[in-house]
Image: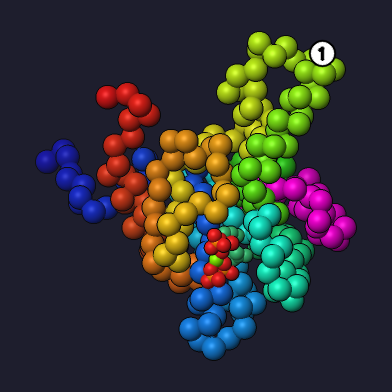
Amino acid sequence: MGFFVRHKNALDKQNLPEHIAIIMDGNGRWAKKRGLMRSAGHTMGAKNLEKIVKYLGDTNVKYLTVYAFSTENWKRPKEEVDALMKLLEKYLRDYDNLLGGEDVRLKVIGRKEGLSKTLIDLIDEVEEKSKNRKKLTINIALNYGGRQEITDAVKIIANKVKQGEIDVCDINEDTINDYIYTASVPDPDLIIRPSGELRLSNFLLWQCAYSEFWFSEILWPDFTPDKLEKALLDFQKRNRRFGGV
Ligand code: IPE
Ligand code: IPE
Ligand code: MG
């Protein structure tokens, strides 16, 4: 027989989202359940991201955007914020070791203000090193807020109008797309939030207009690639209409 029947629960690797976004939530609760410090949850959450990246590296998914630290997360105790920043520094320093041999580009999106000089320098270094890598782009949303992103874009555009570089009549959706942090990145097809919370918490507000959402009770450190695969299978059953029929 010259054909085969694909198992109905098998993932179609040719029909994966081009861009997946994940709100990496639930680290604190994961740690609390085990009587550990919240920072131990963040460490395990970061380890889990390594597994997810490895998994996606073997697929044709082109973009992964992960929410690592929101503009609102500064409200947390200083020691937790410091531990998170140190963890980010550690991963950026380890870039060569972890991803140096992979065709993975790393970008950080969010406001630089408020970040330490050490962290900003590391971000610049890794972005520069990986800028020609193409297979998978990872956007780390750090000190990121969707409203802040839109506000920043509005400021840039307003300045360009003032300078006479843009005519008000020419402002359209593409203009906004050009000045948000994710300029040139396609909108996320799938936004995943583990941990049981059913909200966006200021993540990708402009970009999510036609994203598919997938929520789960599982806490981020436990959200292993097999769980992601479940989300991808569900995604493949969705009927995306974009307002059409
Ligand atoms: C997500 O886990 C990581 C960050 C927000 C930095 P949380 O720290 O929010 O974990 P929970 O929601 O308290 O369990
Ligand atoms: C969103 O999670 C931010 C990140 C995962 C980095 P939060 O834990 O900060 O969100 P809320 O406070 O529950 O809405
Ligand atoms: Mg949380």
Say which of 171 and 50 sits in front.
171
Using residue 50 as the reference point, say whether residue 4 is left or right of it: left
- Per the image, is 128 magenta? yes
Q: Position of residue 123 (x, y in %)?
A: 78, 53
Residue furthest to the front in view is 75
| Residue furthest to the right | 117
Q: Kindly tell me whether residue 223 is visible in this rendering.
A: no
Query: In the picture provided, is 62 more to the left or to the right than 37?
Result: left
| Residue 14 lies in the magenta stretch | no
Point out the stretch of residues depicted in magenta.
101-129
Task: Determine the secondary structure under disc 1.
Answer: loop
Across and down, in percent, residue 97 comes to: 70, 64
Quadrant of the rendering where the C terminus is positioned? top left
| Residue at the image position 45 percent from the left and 61 percent from the top | 197
- Which image quadrant: the N terminus? top left
Looking at the image, can residue 96 be seen? yes
* Residue that numbered label 1 is attached to: 164
The foreground one among 176 and 49 is: 176
Q: Nearer the viewer, residue 231 or 137?
A: 231
Image coordinates for residue 12, horizontal then vertical, percent: 32, 46
